[in-house]
Image (cartoon, rainbow, N blue to C red):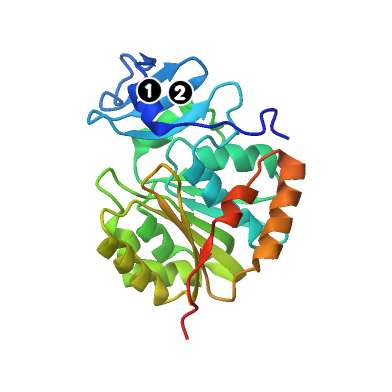
Amino acid sequence: MLKIEQYSMNMEHLLTLPGEQVNHGTAGLESFEIRQNGDLRWIRFPDGTIQSVMLLKEPALPVLTYIQALLCSLLFMPRPSNLLNLGLGSGSIERFILSQYSDIELVSVEIDARIIEISKQYFHIPSSHTVFQLPAEKYLEINQANFDILVSDICTRQGTANSQLSTDFVMHAAHALNTGGVFAVNILPRSESEIIEVLIALRCAFPWILLYDVADMDNIVLFCTVTPSPSPASLMQRAKTLYQSTGLNLSPICRQMIALPAKK
């Protein structure tokens, strides 16, 4: 159970925080700044963008709303047994799952060896946790397993990674899901036309899509299923159960999900 139930983080405020750099002289990580201010630690790129945020006094708590939204994928099945996370970042998904769901088999994939090193050195990911260093699309191409949950958070600083837009990527993702499984995708669209482009690509394999527009951020999280999505009442009930067992309240996000018309 999380000790801190909720924590509100305003990204605009975080961008103004000076923060102390804590990775001075770390070989191979010169292009990344690990910054810290009080109980907050984050990754800052040279162009000023921020990728990840962790609360030091409660590392397992997903601070950013879009990460909480991705964790709503846990609500799509009564008892998910495994989860594939494409795009490690600082390990926000991993910290929560490893802390709160020891019975869920977790597979992590990350293309950048430096990000893997950072997550283990500065962001409380256990050194024993295996992270496959591969492009997400390559992992899906060679993958032989099936998952209840597939999370894709492989946005670049320029927007949604192009690999998420390919037909092969989407089809491989659909084939990697167990019956009733969900594919949760975080995107950073630069225009309405890009949102439409992503939806068209996803519709090739996923007739049912729920959309969550993240408040005060540019992110949109999409929940894609091959079979009909759970009803709003089921999602809310499972959110209540998750809150009782972990202390993370996902009900406000569930209330704001928009069900797109199912593809005939």
Residue 12 visible (yes or no)? yes
Q: Which residue is mark 2?
A: 41
Q: Amino acid at mark 2?
A: Arg
Q: Which residue is mark 1?
A: 34
Residue 230 in the figure: left or right of residue 48: right
Residue plotted at (43% across, 18% down): 36
Residue 102 in the figure: left or right of residue 118: right
| Residue nearer the viewer, 155 or 84 | 155
Q: What percent of the width, then of the height, locates residue 172?
A: 43, 69
Q: Residues within 10 Å of mark 2 (few under 14, many from 20)?
A: many
Residue 218 in the figure: left or right of residue 41: left
The circle drawn on residue 103 is none
Q: Residues within 10 Å of mark 1 (few under 14, many from 20)?
A: many
Could you tell which of marks 1 and 2 lies nearer the N-terminus? 1
**Tag 1 near tag 2, CB within 8 Å:** yes
Q: Is residue 207 above or below residue 75?
A: below
Residue plotted at (44% across, 16% down): 37
Q: What percent of the width, then of the height, locates residue 217?
A: 39, 43
Residue 129 visible (yes or no)? no
Q: What percent of the width, then of the height, locates residue 188?
A: 34, 51
Q: What percent of the width, then of the height, locates residue 56?
A: 55, 22
**Which residue is outermost to the bottom?**
264
Q: Is residue 130 above or below residue 83?
A: above
- Name the secondary structure under disc 2: strand
| Residue nearer the viewer, 59 or 134 | 59
Q: Report, in whole angstroms, how far the alpha carbon at label 1 lies from the one at label 2.
A: 7 Å
Residue 206 in the figure: left or right of residue 58: left
